[in-house]
Amino acid sequence: MKKKPYTWEEIREFLRKELGKTKHIMTFGTIGSCNVERDIDTIITKKPKSKSSLFYEEMHGIFDNLNYHLNKKYGVQCIRFYQCEPEFLTLSNFQKNDLAIHALVYTSYKQIREDWERSLLPGENIKGILEKNYNCLLGSVKDLFSKDFQDDSYSSMFYYIQVYDRINSNYSEKFLVEIMNFYYDFVFTKRLGLKAPIAKNKKDVRKYFYQLCDIVDKLNAKKSK
């Protein structure tokens, strides 16, 4: 079986260089095996004092640059996904040499706890899993247990930001705009009681995504008072 033209070591070094330029990402690391033949599982967390929009812009930018690097050097894509790997990668037009990265993105430890607790087996605990398996390229596992990141004012609206983010998905522009407008209609209208923006292109999709991040940050700030 022919292997992919790049290695995890190359991807890791590229990510380390990109992460060295960041200001709003607290930790970025892998969890589990780093098998480029299948996918790379990652956890990415935000610095507690940073705006969510700036954090997501940095993260999207890293994957933009990784995608550009892989496309220019090998003619392949980097595809970031959150869940439902086979379905998601089919929608993303995944080709055999593309790099699939499973990214779990969190703004607080409470968000990790709510995302993970339902899947724990008897005897498992989140802290132990992270300490044993989370290998950071930026930051430290200890950062996840810091007082600031433990903040209980976390808003459940960050859940929608995490699971509806299709930026870096390699969707066609038409499909990306269509699916993100569907999500914006739900979140803005039905969850926030606001008029939903309507994206016309990829640029709009990002603009409205970062606007949503700022809105949720403000709600979270009010909740913490």
Image: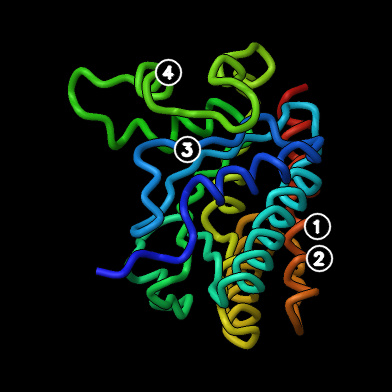
Compare marks 4 and 2 and give the one earlier in the sequence. Answer: 4
Mark 3 vs mark 4, CA separation in Å:
12 Å
Kindly report the distance in space between the C-alpha atoms of the residues bearing marks 1 and 3: 29 Å
Residue at screen point 57% across, 84% down: 175
Image-based side of 3 in relation to 44, left or right = left
Quarter of the picture holding the N terminus: bottom left
Residue 79 higher or lower than 45, as above or below: below
* Residue that mark 3 sits on: 30
Q: Residue at x 36, y 62 (%)?
A: 85
Camera-nearest label, 4 or 1: 4
| Residue at the image position 66 percent from the left and 73 percent from the top | 72
**Residue 218 at least partly seen:** no
Q: Residue 154: x and y, percent?
A: 62, 31
Between 192 and 106, the one lying in front of the other is: 106
Which-is-in-front pick, marks 1 and 3?
Answer: 3
Q: Report crowding for label 3: few under 14, some 14 to 19, many 20 or more residues within 10 A (C-alpha).
A: many
The residue that mark 2 highlights is 207
- Which element type, helix, strand or loop, lies under badge 1? helix
Query: Depth check: 85 or 8 in front?
Result: 8
> How many angstroms separate mark 2 from mark 3 (CA)?
28 Å
Which residue is painted at 69% across and 17% down in the image? 148
Q: Which of 6 and 119 lies nearest the eye of the viewer?
A: 6
**Secondary structure of residue under mark 4:** helix
Tag 1 and tag 2, C-beta contact below 8 Å: yes
For mark 3, give the secondary structure: strand
Residue lying at the far top in this picture: please name it.
147
Along the line of sight, which residue is nearer the eye, 8 or 170?
8
Residue 98 placement, left or right of 150: left
Where residue 211 is drawn, which disc sits there? 1
Q: Position of residue 206 (x, y in %)?
A: 75, 66
Q: Any mark on residue 131, and which?
A: 4
